């Protein structure tokens, strides 16, 4: 099977390193990608579930721009709604438009716990705001979060050991293990009247590790403890939201939080996030000042209205779960036919997959890189995302690519053999650090290896 080349991408990256720290910063940085030279660095266009890089290579996208794409790139329904709003009255005006009220009403109608809603741009805007509302409502300083849980890029979210984060930033944030109710009980006992909020994702989806679903009764016990101790229960549904249940992923797992933070799939790629909450916290949310220059843009609100309407019309979570199940089942069987064990964790519409034959993850990195070189865009460090734009043809082509990738691995390495020749695995939650002189594309592998030294 033909594999991709990335000459233009690598040349552009070399230009970028001269004027942009790291060349590409943040979660699109090549550093966590192993091997980086197997991946495209720059996209030229996208349509449906595919994107094309600047070298002309086509990819079936299983990262969906790290989650925002849910109905497909350049979705006509969404883009028409945006164009209509801009042509009718513009985007960012001198005051909010009625679309803000329309969107808030839609979320209150869709999400059972929601009695109000407000909007921003990024998921981290909302998770940060949620902790402020919890502190305002309770008059308490401390927030409990999960070890390895990701909520954005504010200092408290990144935690100790990251550049630019000081001890004072995290002094009032307590991290406990996922699925450990006893640990939360101990924190409450050791900090009487001091815990303002508990924040977590609906299920644990860290990087470089298997996703872990909540244990039976976990959320119900956490909810009960929060109510008993006057702690605000916050769900970070930024990544999961509307891919598992249209009423919020908490509905999928059967519990009722006080605040829910959404982003990603809400606008099919247009910049908008939302927080919804109970009536009891509405007045406190009104007291906490939190705003941004572009938070009142009308076009992303038009996109969100159209997106949520379509997700509800087609029962999108069901479609994404079905596609994800067919794809992961097929991949597991192909892996088995070559003597490998491919473990699937999380939920089918947002799976994390890992070859267990090599605990160093190097073999899995080689597999994901081989698939990407053949046109199925997989990352080895992060959960994948399904969309309703993925087709049966995409599925068939993906499984062909997976088969060819495993055939290649089997020719070069016996199952169970540790892959010491692959690129070093990047540490969990590593954030690439810009060097004083950013490395050119030819040194991207060493840049990734250096990133392994940074651990949350």
Image (cartoon, rainbow, N blue to C red):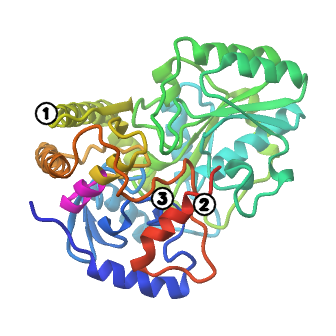
Q: Which of the 4 quarters of the picture holds residue 319?
A: top left
Circles 1, 2 touching at the beta carbon (< 8 Å)? no
Residue at (43, 63) in percent of width and height? 85
Frontmost residue, 214 versus 447: 447
Near mark 1 (Cα within 10 A), the count class, few <14, some 14-19 or many ≥20, is: few
Mark 1 or 2, closer to the camera? 1
Q: Which residues are magenta?
A: 368-377
- The residue pinned by badge 1 equals 337
Residue at (52, 37) in percent of width and height? 107
The secondary structure type at the circle numbered 1 is: helix
Circle number at residue 296 = 2
Frontmost residue, 20 versus 295: 20
Q: Position of residue 250 (x, y in %)?
A: 53, 25
- The residue pinned by badge 3 equals 300
Q: Considering only vertical position in the picture, is 112 above or below 64?
A: above
Residue at (39, 57) in percent of width and height? 65
Which tag, 1 or 3, sits closer to the chain's start?
3
How far apart are the two marked residues, 1 and 3, measured between alpha carbons?
46 Å
């Amino acid at each position: 099977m033909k594999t991709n080349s990335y000459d233009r991408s690598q040349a552009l990256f070399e230009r970028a390193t001269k004027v942009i720290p790291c060349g590409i910063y943040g979660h699109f940085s090549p550093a966590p990608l192993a091997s980086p030279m197997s991946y495209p660095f720059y996209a030229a266009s996208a349509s449906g579930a595919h994107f094309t890089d600047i070298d002309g290579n086509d990819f079936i996208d299983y990262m969906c721009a790290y989650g925002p794409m849910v109905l497909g790139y350049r979705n006509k329904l969404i883009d028409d709604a945006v164009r209509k709003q801009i042509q009718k009255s513009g985007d960012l005006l001198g005051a909010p438009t009625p679309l803000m009220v329309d969107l808030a009403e839609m979320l209150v109608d869709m999400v059972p716990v929601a009695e109000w809603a407000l909007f921003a741009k990024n998921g981290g805007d909302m998770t940060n705001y949620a902790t402020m509302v919890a502190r305002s409502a309770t008059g308490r300083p401390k927030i409990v979060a999960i070890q390895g849980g990701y909520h954005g890029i504010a200092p408290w979210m990144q935690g100790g050991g990251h550049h630019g984060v000081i001890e004072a930033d995290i002094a009032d944030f307590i991290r406990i293990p996922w699925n450990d109710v006893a640990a939360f009980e101990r924190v409450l006992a050791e900090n009487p009247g001091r815990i303002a909020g508990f924040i977590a994702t609906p299920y644990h989806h860290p990087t470089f590790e298997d996703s872990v679903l909540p244990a039976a009764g976990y959320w119900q016990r956490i909810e009960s403890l929060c109510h008993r101790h006057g702690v605000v229960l916050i769900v970070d549904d930024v990544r999961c939201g509307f891919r598992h249940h249209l009423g919020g992923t908490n509905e999928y797992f059967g519990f009722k939080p006080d605040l829910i933070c959404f982003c990603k799939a809400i606008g099919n790629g247009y910049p908008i996030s939302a927080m919804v909450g109970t009536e009891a916290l509405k007045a406190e949310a009104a007291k906490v000042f939190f705003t941004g220059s572009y938070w009142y843009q009308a076009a992303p609100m038009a996109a969100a209205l159209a997106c949520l309407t379509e997700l509800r019309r087609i029962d999108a979570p069901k479609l994404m779960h079905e596609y994800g199940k067919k794809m992961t089942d097929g991949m597991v069987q192909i892996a088995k036919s070559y003597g490998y064990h491919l473990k699937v964790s999380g939920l089918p519409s947002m799976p994390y997959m890992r070859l267990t034959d090599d605990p160093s993850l190097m073999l899995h990195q080689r597999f994901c890189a081989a698939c990407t070189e053949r046109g199925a865009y997989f990352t080895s460090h992060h959960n994948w995302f399904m969309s309703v734009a993925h087709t049966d043809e995409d599925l068939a082509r993906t499984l062909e690519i997976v088969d060819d990738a495993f055939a290649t691995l089997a020719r070069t390495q016996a199952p169970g053999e540790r892959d010491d020749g692959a690129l070093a695995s990047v540490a969990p939650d590593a954030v690439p650090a810009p060097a004083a002189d950013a490395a050119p594309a030819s040194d991207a592998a060493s840049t990734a290896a250096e990133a392994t030294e940074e651990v949350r």
